Amino acid sequence: MSIAKKAIVEFLGTFWLVLGGCGSAVLAAAFPEVGIGLVGVSFAFGLTVLTMAYSIGHISGCHLNPAVSIGLLVGGRFPAKDLIPYVVAQVAGGIVAGFTLYTIANGKAGFSLEGGFASNGFAEHSPGGYSLAAGFLTEFVMTFMFLIIILGSTDERAPAGFAPIAIGLGLTLIHLISIPITNTSVNPARSTGTAVVVGGWAISQLWLFWVAPILGAAAAGIFHKVVCAKN
């Protein structure tokens, strides 16, 4: 499979992740009387990954996330030559999804970006008012565990065919834990997709949602290679 085709499906998959996950938060989380709430948003993110893993996993591996690509690279599961095309495609997919969601949401009278537009943040922009340090540690640990799930469930020794379920449910659990802290990133492309629409504070805090997930993913790649790989 050519790198161009892989990049295209990574763009599409990341578009779906941001549109589906952030769209559930912006459009449906607090919808009058039948809002899906935090649990619904958590499952929406997990379902986007689950559905895409079965749809495009056989083409690109369904990373949908620069941190995942880097973690797999460090873990010896992904070639360095493909990293930049993957990351560019993922970020582009997230940004296009962000503006698509904005266009849809703006179709309702009274819509405003003041609600945060599902952007990730810390301190006064954390849903629960958590500090920068708490946000950084959360994003590092959650991304570390996410990569452990990915690396373990896709290992050749793991039961075949079940990895998408483990990964999708893993992402759901991560959101259930960390939405109150940072609105949950664990994915720089997801964070960038909404931050570029909101601008201002979301852009100024975006660095954390690149640095912490990438460090957590790299640490997981090292851990898996040293501790979990075949001797």
Image (tube, rainbow, N blue to C red):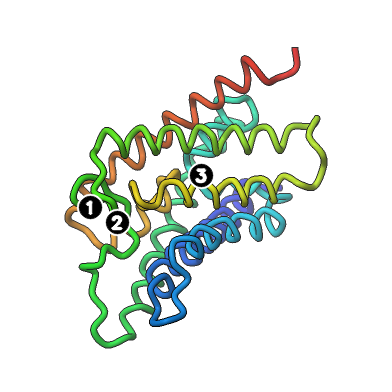
Q: CA distance from mark 1 to mark 3?
A: 32 Å
Q: Position of residue 72 (x, y in %)?
A: 58, 32
Q: Nearer the viewer, mark 3 or mark 2?
A: 2
Identify the amino acid type marked 3.
Pro
Query: Which numbered circle lies on residue 85?
Result: 3
Q: Which residue is mark 2?
A: 195
Identify the amino acid type marked 1.
His
Identify the amino acid type marked 2.
Ala
Q: Quadrant of residue 224?
A: top right
Picture residue at 35% right of the left edge, 51% below the top: 180
Q: Nearer the viewer, mark 2 or mark 1?
A: 1
In what element is the residue under mark 3? helix
In what element is the residue under mark 1? helix
Q: Which residue is mark 1?
A: 125
In what element is the residue under mark 2? helix
Q: Position of residue 26 (x, y in %)?
A: 37, 70
Q: Is residue 103 above or below residue 206?
A: below
